Image (cartoon, grey):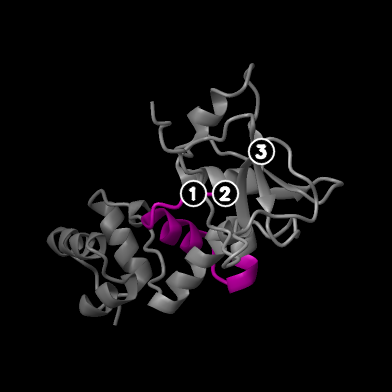
Amino acid sequence: MDQKLTDEQAQAAATEFEAGARMSDVAARYGCTTKTLRKSMHRVGYDSRQRPRQPKKMKPPMVKKLVDLYESGLTHEQIRTETGLSRYTIHYALKGLGKPRRYKVWANRDGYQYMTIPVSHPLYESFKAMRSRERNINTPVHRFVMAEHLGRALMPWETVHHIDGDRSNNAIGNLQLRQGRHGKGATFSCMNCGSHNIVAVPLPEAST
């Protein structure tokens, strides 16, 4: 039965819908169709389209997979291809985790991947400060991933090396920060344990 709603009922239904209830559930409670419910809410000044869409709830394993794919340097579109999730779900899931959106990635003829840094990214201004003029900020993905890891834009003399030699593998665990130019096919590692976790250690002050 398709029952017409009074203004009071329409207002109450709009409140339920705004709180997150499904349109079909609210319509069933008031004994009307979803079409009638939308018209009734519109009559009292509520547009059902104005409620923010709710992102799909994900289980912890899928959340971890999203974060791992993001940390590996993939864009939202690439993550969508890997997971089959919608762009909307990926965007809001990562946004809730403090992961800014990444845009299209392309590769140059040397195999290095590049991307445009979105204006909304927290590091946009620091990257912009390194440029001499206004323009779109395109940067190698491996430098961008390292900058996100450090929380700052890289200095011009800093370089980032792919440990396994694969220029498309931009996972932070495969990247090594260096100073100056670095050769191909070599990486810095501890001669005793083989660890790549190497940092500069200040020399002790010379005794006087």
Looking at the image, the residue that sits furthest to the right is: 109
Which residue is nearer to you in this view: 1 or 102?
Answer: 102
Residue 188 to residue 16: above or below: above
Which disc is residue 89 wearing?
none
Residue type at numbered disc 2: Val
Quarter containing the N terminus: bottom left
Mark in the foreground, 1 or 3? 1
Q: Is residue 179 left or right of residue 200?
A: right
Question: Do we see residue 103 in this rendering?
Answer: no
Which residue is denoted by mark 1 in the rendering? 149
Determine the main secondary structure of the stretch shown in magenta: helix
Q: Which residue in the structure is indicated by mark 3?
A: 139
Quadrant position of the C terminus in the picture: top left
**Mark 1–mark 2 CB contact (< 8 Å):** yes
Residue farthest to the bottom, as pictured:
1
Task: Tell me the residue at 55%/30% (across/down).
Answer: 127
Classify 161 as above or below 35.
Answer: above
Residue 95: in magenta span: yes
- Amino acid marked by disc 3: Thr
Mark 2 lies on residue = 145
Mark 2 falls on what kind of element? helix
The residues tagged by marks 1 and 3 sit, at their Cα atoms, a distance apart of 15 Å
Q: Magenta part of the protein: which range?
A: 80-102
Q: Amino acid at mark 1?
A: His
CA distance separating discs 3 and 2: 10 Å
Give the CA separation, mark 1 to mark 2: 6 Å
The image quarter in which residue 186 lies: bottom right
